[in-house]
Image (tube, helix red, strand yellow):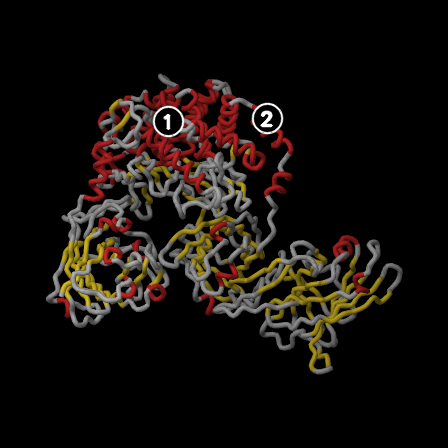
Amino acid sequence: MKKVTYLLMAVVLLFSLSIFSQSLIHSFEYTHDLNNDNSGSTFELSERFVYEGKYSAIIVPSGESAETKMAFELSGERLNNWLGNDTLRLAVYTKPVTSLKPNKFFLGMADVTEGWKWVDGIFSETEPKDGWNIVEYKLNDKMKDVILDGKYMLYFSFMHTQGVTNIPLKDPFYVDNLIALNSEEPEIERIYIWSMDSEEEIGTFGNDNTGAKFELVKDLAAEGLYAMKVIPDGEAIEAKIAIELSGEKVPLWMGRNEVTMNVYIPKENKIKPTMYFLGMADVTSGWEWVGGVFSDTQVSPGWNKVKFEIAGNMSNLVEGNKYMIYLAFAGFNENNVKTPLYEPFYVDGIFVEKSSKPTFEELLAMAPSNIKEEVQTLLELDDEALLEEIQKRAFLYFWNEANPQNGLIKDRSTNNSPASIAAVGMGLCAIPIGIERHWISYEQGYERVLTTLKTFVEGKVEGLNGFFYHFVDMNDGKRAGNSEISSIDTAILIAGALTSGAYFKDTEVEILANKLYENVNWQWMLNGEDTLSMGFKPEAGFLGARWDSFNEGLLAYVLAIGSPTYPISPDSWDKIFRPVKNDTYIYLPQETLFVYQYPNIWIDFRDKEDKYANYFNNAEAATRYNWLFTVQNRFKYETYDMDIWGLSASDGPNGYKAYGAVDGNHDGTVAPYASISSIPFTYDLSMNAIRGMLSKYGPLVWGEYGFYSAFNVDEIWFSDQYIGIDQGDIILMIENYRSGLIWNLFMNNENIQRALDEIGFVNKESDYAVTPWYVEEYKRLLTSSEEKLAEAPKISHVMIDGKLTEWENIPRYSVTEDMNVPAGGIKPIDKKAQILHSYFSVAWDDENLYISADVYDEYVVINITPDDVGGYYRTDSVEFYINPSIAGSNAGLFKIAILPFDTEGNVQAVRHEDANPGPISKSASKVEVASNRTDYGYIIELKIPFEYLGITNPQPNLKLGFSYTIHNSNKKDASLGEYVRENIISWNPLPDIWANPQNWGTIELKE
């Protein structure tokens, strides 16, 4: 057997297994067919040392025989698996404490078809070690030349040989998983990235703030020597393992598409981990989520191989980058409610493989014939009939995937899915469509809606102050998992209730719908601020994120301002930050398409505008941009085409992600609902997409409820699931295009009309998306700051020690509490309650530029660990931006972010989003930075050699573009790594100042 050894910090083991010709000869899940060939050995089953399956065989030597033997019959199915192969592999485990271990392995074979006739025998060349070994036997021609209906005996002999003497074995050892394979067939590599065989390796693992602890145990193993015991804290809703993936391990992971984790679950555990999730983040120069996938493995007590299928950026890593792997484990009680794990379980090794995947053509060929016929029929329909069928399929999701006893609707089409209150809201809207389209009767629809509204109004769904948890149990309405009380999902629920109430006017349904709306305390969700919080958790209070920038939250504001019981001020509408793209439309930077669609599902924005925009035209502009972006990238991604588009939040090869039409936020994944639901804005592009998807990929993207959630041709990945809110977007927006039913019902509500009036909407036909006034106003916001100039005198020397001794006579410039940077999710400084300002100075000599910053911060949050490189943006930190191009340099931007203190008290610095991003140890090793704690905050000192700015001979009067920004948090109980940034102030307090060098100030070198 060819061995490959990788010298890593942790042992990495490589085994080669054939996926083409590997055939099982004996599983050792039983021992009744084993005999000892008169060697005195006995056989037992073990569930603790297992290489494959649930059991292995313990071989207990007699202690007297020179050879310990195991024999069994080879016939029938076993013999059929033997044929055509030339190699046997047997897994053998010996404990490190064993005094004498088998070091010589023999395989003999006899033909017993008609009597007993010796065939031949061979020795293995495997050199064993402690722990699990793969003992390989190369079959000779005689042993391969067998008769299919024959009967043979295999004799395995295990010996400890010293010189020419066999010394009797005394200690038990284990055998498992005897397989046959053809060495000429292609093989895949099983590469263990983490073996969990040493205290040193386990000591590098984290628990991602879940309280889990890890111990090395020596009484069970699925690979290598030992295993790791995971001890949950009994309180966290999930137990987690966080492991760094870096250095030589990254190339081993690259290009693999399957990750497997060996997990042992004791049979006595009351709550067993049955949910497994693998997530990945790139932490090379910050913290950026890569993706995450759930395992489909169904586990049971004993050893399990939990498999994750990965693709895209989770597989195609960048060599030299650093990643974090997050493994999450969760259990459920008898009511299928996620429950904290409190009993230990075990993990032993994580390996990666590159398994073969069927080609796109093979997948098409395997598609059921009835689906192929159905797709062909769909393509022959005219547009109206085709839209009708798509709507009907989406409607059936809401009808069939609901609990008829309470009206709750699944979040997605999986068996154990919780209910989504947003899906319920959309389902309430789907009922009138189903009645109007004659898919159900009026009576059926009325009873379903009545049941649903009673469930909520009568308190059978868990919530607070009229708001409800995002996800709830399908049966009892209790909070599911760790979900939040969600303001936007409650808003969608209320919108659906009001829509169905308007349809069933003057009935109990209308009364209940109005009651549900009246119960919502929108003022509470403000939490003392001007904008709505995104939600609330009883464990931590209100979420830090707010609906303070342009997105789907517009719907919540209209409902909140129009509330008949707890209205908020219409001034809150003006607190929403609305960036404008190229003077064309107000946009979300991530360009996730659904955010433009959702408010338009209920609010008829056609021929209406506030002082900012016509939001219907705005959605059309964003949709056409989404299409154009996809088309422009069609040569990079096979999925995209002129008629295959739609980048929005959806499932993907690496789990659910808020995809969008912007570089870095797409990977070839298309969500069918995104293009279909755009039909009121872009009928032509949407119909082309519907027919394009059906004609090219129909049998793979179409099923019981219509179009599946997403697909990615580049990764040969096609979802087989439906998501409730996607199905709702489809049926409701198609109906708005066809009849305007949802718009008409919702807009008839007098509270909604009053809200639009108070906001300042007027009826006006226009071709633009953004009003001319706001186009100019946004330009003014971007450029209105006065030009800033900081003089930098020449000095002889500055010691970078975090002290300001040498800076006493250097000019100081201030950044005050009034210099707030407008940005989504960021709050202005409350000058009555907060202290946050800073003074900075700049100086130079012939070789270096020096910067000092004296930061006044009443509470310095320290929650970033030393290995969390680039975590500055989540907490208290500063940034300096330098643009040397105005001095004639071609070096590019130099932007450095500095974390004053990590959890060990050290300063961190990283270049980011500039000409050479990365930790300064790699990107600018001659840069020096120091920090020092003060009674009022902290001091930063920085030395930047001019060579990094492309300046070789600095002279007085030379000018550099410059800006200085401070990030702030006052959260005293911030968890490690938690995003807690609340405020940003800057010398140039303009939107996206970090991305607009033309708006920076200037440094001028002086004598």
**Residue appearing at x 78%, y 68% in the figure:** 108
Residue flagged by tag 1: what amino acid is it?
Ala
The mark closer to the camera, 2 or 1, is 2
Graded by Cα atoms within 10 Å as few (under 14), some (14 to 19) or many (20 or more), the crowding at tag 2 reads: few
**Percent position of residue 198, x then y:** 50, 69
Q: Nearer the viewer, residue 391 or 539?
A: 391
Identity of the amino acid at label 2? Thr
Can residue 868 be seen in this snapshot? yes
Q: Earlier in the sequence, mark 2 or mark 1?
A: 2
Q: Which residue is mark 1?
A: 497
Is 790 left, or right, of 61 in this rendering?
left
Give the residue number, with chain letter if any, for mark 2. Answer: 377
Measured from the top left, where is residue 554 in percent x and y? 30, 34
- Tell me the residue at 23%/33% (across/down): 568
- Compared with 323, 397 (above or below) is above
How packed is label 1: few (under 14 Cα within 10 Å), some, or many (20 or more)?
many
Check the picture and name the quadrant holding the C terminus: bottom left
Callouts 2 and 1 close, C-beta under 8 Å? no
Up-down relation of residue 31 to residue 651 (above or below): below
Nearest to the observer: residue 791 or residue 841: 791
Q: Secondary structure at mark 1?
A: helix
Residue 451 location in percent, x, y?
A: 43, 26
Q: Quadrant of the N terminus?
A: bottom right
